[in-house]
Image (cartoon, rainbow, N blue to C red):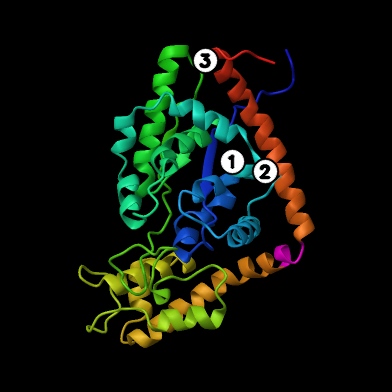
Amino acid sequence: MSEEIKKERKKRSLSLIQPTSIPTLGNYLGAMKGWSSFQNDYDTVFGIADLHSITVRQDPKKLRQQTIELYALLLSVGLDPDKSILFIQSHVPQHSQLGWILNCYTMFGELNRMTQFKDKSQQHSDNVNSGLFTYPCLMAADILLYQADIVPVGADQKQHLEITRDIAERFNGIYGNVFTVPEAYIPKNGARVMSLADPTRKMSKSDPNPKGTVYLTDEPSVIMKKFKSAVTDSEMSVRYAEGKDGINNLMTIYSAVTGKDFDAIESEFAGKGYGDFKKAVGEAVVAELEPVQKKYNEYMADKAYLQEQWTKGAEIASKVSQRTLDKVMKKVGFLQK
């Protein structure tokens, strides 16, 4: 009997993020902050979804720059190219190839029910393109190519994961066990961060009010200014309660970056005003982002290293995804080379 102990295969997770803007504090506290530790428990795949971003018209120069910046930020929050597959979507043509095939296994009615298509059609009524409509097929290809077991999702992406599962089960029903049917993973510790300007709405990269969103590359002085102008209420007591959306949001942020629970926060700021509290939250966020920003600036100063890493990531991603694509093409009936 071999002395080697066969290790149980780690479950594979996949996360993609669009390069349409610098990620926000909400993106960071809701998901990105936990990604580095995720690498220890899962076989992790992370990608920059630049193909998805062109369903809305992009400035080409800006898109290229934002893709570089986002890659540097992913490294800065602790993603390790030696532990994870870290790639840029457009560098891996298998995504587009499988995306087209899955178009042919997805029903028109399914796509027509997608909430995000309806929302974006209203937001960009001058550019309701077919890519926007078939977006879920490419998203399904992203996931199924890597035989992902789990996909960390927020509430706005659950519907896309559901259609991915439907597509995978339909394809498997016809051709046998080709795709792993992925499960949704809801991060336990991810904080839901709301806009500082309108705490009833989620903090968003596309918020028209610049005061509402903190970006990961914001200068400390900018971060402090945004927190000092954050919307609160007239009560002037730091406590978590219904109807205190602004304070609830600030407490959520402060808790996420300090590790203190709400009771401890209430005790810390008992008898103090909102000005003191907003200043403390801003300072805690600045301290949290300082090491991320330091690494980011170092990576951005070394473009050769970034290119080396995304080239390596594309090679690994292509090799892994090609195995799935070969199986799919054989099942469908395409002549092999």
Q: Is residue 86 left or right of residue 115?
A: right
Tell whether label 1 touches label 2 (CB within 8 Å): yes
Residue sticking out furthest to the left: 243
* Circle count: 3
Residue 335 image offset from top left, x and y in percent: 62, 13
Tell whether label 3 touches label 1 (CB within 8 Å): no
- The magenta segment: 298-302
Q: Quadrant of the C terminus?
A: top right
Which residue is identified by label 3?
332
Q: Is residue 289 left or right of residue 242?
A: right
Q: Please, what is the three-letter code of the amino acid marked with disc 2? A: Lys
Indicate the secondary structure of the residue bearing disc 3.
helix
From the viewer's side, name the closer residue of 240 and 194.
Answer: 194
Which residue is identified by label 1?
44
N-terminal label among 3 and 2: 2
From the viewer's side, name the closer residue of 241 and 65.
Answer: 65
Residue 27 image offset from top left, x and y in percent: 47, 59
Residue located 39% across and 49% down the image: 154
From the viewer's side, name the closer residue of 92 and 245.
Answer: 92
The vertical placement of 15 against 167, above or below, is below
Mark 1 or mark 3: which is in front?
A: 3
Indicate the secondary structure of the residue bearing disc 2.
loop
